[in-house]
C-alpha cells in the first residue's frame, strides 16, 4: 500500500488466483479476490483509494493492479476454484495467503471496505480499520467463511466467530441470502445496518427502524463471481457521497449487475450509469 496519510476509500482484503470452471473442457485462470473486483469499480469512477492486501511469492498479477499486495516470502496466494457449469456455484480453496495484520492498515479513510475472502481479515485488524475510518462497510463472507474437510467453502454461524462482538464497529454489513441464514437477522439489524442481496430480486436494507426493498437492475448472468464485491463498492460510493441508504442500494445494484454480465474482473463503462445515479 502506498505510504500516504489518507484516502477516500480503503479496501482491506486479499487478491486471489481464481480458476473458473465454466463447463466440460472450459476453464480459465484469472485475477480474483474482493480487492480486484472492488478496485475495478473505484478505478472506473475515479475514486482516490488504497488497498491493504497480502499475497504469496507466487502472485502472478502484480502488473494488473494499481496497489500491489504485501508479498510474504515462502507463502502462497489464496486460490479459489469455482465450479460454475452445474447451475450452482461450488467454491473450493486450494491455498490460503497470510492474514492482513493491524500494522498493514497505514492510512485513514472516509469509507473502508472490509472485504476478506478467506479468513484473512483478523478481528484485531477490523478493530484497527474501524479506528481509522468514518464508515466501515463489511462483507459477511469475510466473517463467516470456513472450510470443510474437502476444501469446500461453508458459512459458520456468526455467534461461533470472534466477529459477533464487533458488529457495532461495522456501519453496513452486506450478506447474501445464503450468508444471512448464518445470522440472527433481527439481532444483527439492531446492532448495524444489514443489507441482504437477493440476486434477481434486488436487495433489502434493514436497520433497527426500517426495511427498504430495492429492485434489481436487469442483467443477463454469465458469471456471478465478484457481483457481491461490485455491489459492495457501489454501496460504499453512495456513502462517500452521503446519499440516503435507498440510493446507496440503487448504486450498488447497478454495479452488481454489471459484474454478472462478464467473466472475471469486469471492464466497466460508467457512461451507461443512469443519470439519476451519477
Image: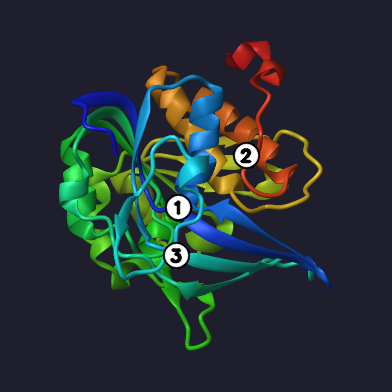
> Residue 5's x, y, as percent?
18, 26
> Residue 225's x, y, as percent?
63, 53
Could you tell me if the residues under marks 1 and 3 are in contact, i.e. CB atoms within 8 Å?
Answer: yes
Check the image and name the residue furthest to the right.
24
> Residue 85's x, y, as percent?
79, 67
Residue matched to label 2: 256
Which residue is painted at 42% across and 73% down in the image?
146
In the rendered image, the quadrant that contains the N terminus is top left
Asked if one can make out residue 195 in the rendered structure from this viewpoint, the answer is no
Q: Is residue 215 left or right of residue 151?
A: right
In the rendered image, the quadrant that contains the C terminus is top right
Picture disc at residue 70: none
Q: Is residue 63 left or right of residue 7?
A: right
Residue matched to label 1: 15
Q: Earlier in the sequence, mark 1 or mark 3?
A: 1
Residue matched to label 3: 78
Viewer-proximal residue among 6 and 276: 6
Amino acid at each position: 500500500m502506498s505510504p500516504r496519510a489518507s484516502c477516500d476509500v480503503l479496501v482491506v482484503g486479499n487478491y486471489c488466483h481464481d480458476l473458473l470452471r465454466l463447463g466440460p473442457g472450459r476453464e480459465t485462470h484469472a485475477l480474483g479476490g474482493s480487492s480486484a473486483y472492488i478496485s475495478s469499480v473505484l478505478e472506473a469512477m475515479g475514486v482516490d483509494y488504497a488497498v491493504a492486501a497480502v499475497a504469496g511469492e507466487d502472485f502472478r498479477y502484480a502488473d494488473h493492479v494499481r496497489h500491489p499486495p504485501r508479498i510474504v516470502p515462502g507463502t502462497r496466494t489464496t486460490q479459489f476454484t469455482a465450479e460454475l457449469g452445474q447451475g450452482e456455484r461450488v467454491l473450493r480453496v486450494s491455498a490460503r495467503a497470510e492474514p492482513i495484520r493491524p500494522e498493514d492498515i497505514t492510512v485513514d479513510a472516509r469509507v473502508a471496505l472490509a472485504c476478506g475472502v478467506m479468513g484473512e481479515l483478523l478481528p484485531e485488524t477490523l478493530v484497527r480499520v474501524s479506528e481509522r475510518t468514518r464508515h466501515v462497510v463489511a462483507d459477511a463472507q469475510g466473517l463467516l467463511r470456513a472450510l470443510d474437510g474437502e476444501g469446500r467453502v461453508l458459512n459458520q454461524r456468526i455467534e461461533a466467530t470472534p466477529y459477533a462482538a464487533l458488529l457495532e464497529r461495522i456501519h453496513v454489513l452486506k450478506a447474501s441470502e445464503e450468508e444471512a441464514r448464518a445470522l440472527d437477522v433481527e439481532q444483527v439489524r439492531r446492532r448495524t445496518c444489514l443489507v441482504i442481496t437477493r440476486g434477481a430480486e434486488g436487495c433489502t436494507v434493514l436497520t433497527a427502524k426500517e426495511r427498504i426493498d430495492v429492485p434489481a437492475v436487469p442483467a443477463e448472468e454469465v458469471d456471478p463471481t465478484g457481483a457481491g464485491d461490485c455491489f459492495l463498492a457501489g454501496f460504499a460510493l453512495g456513502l462517500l457521497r452521503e446519499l440516503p441508504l435507498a440510493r446507496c442500494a440503487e448504486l450498488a445494484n447497478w454495479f452488481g449487475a454489471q459484474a454478472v454480465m462478464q467473466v472475471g474482473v469486469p471492464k466497466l463503462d460508467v457512461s451507461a450509469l443512469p443519470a439519476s445515479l451519477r
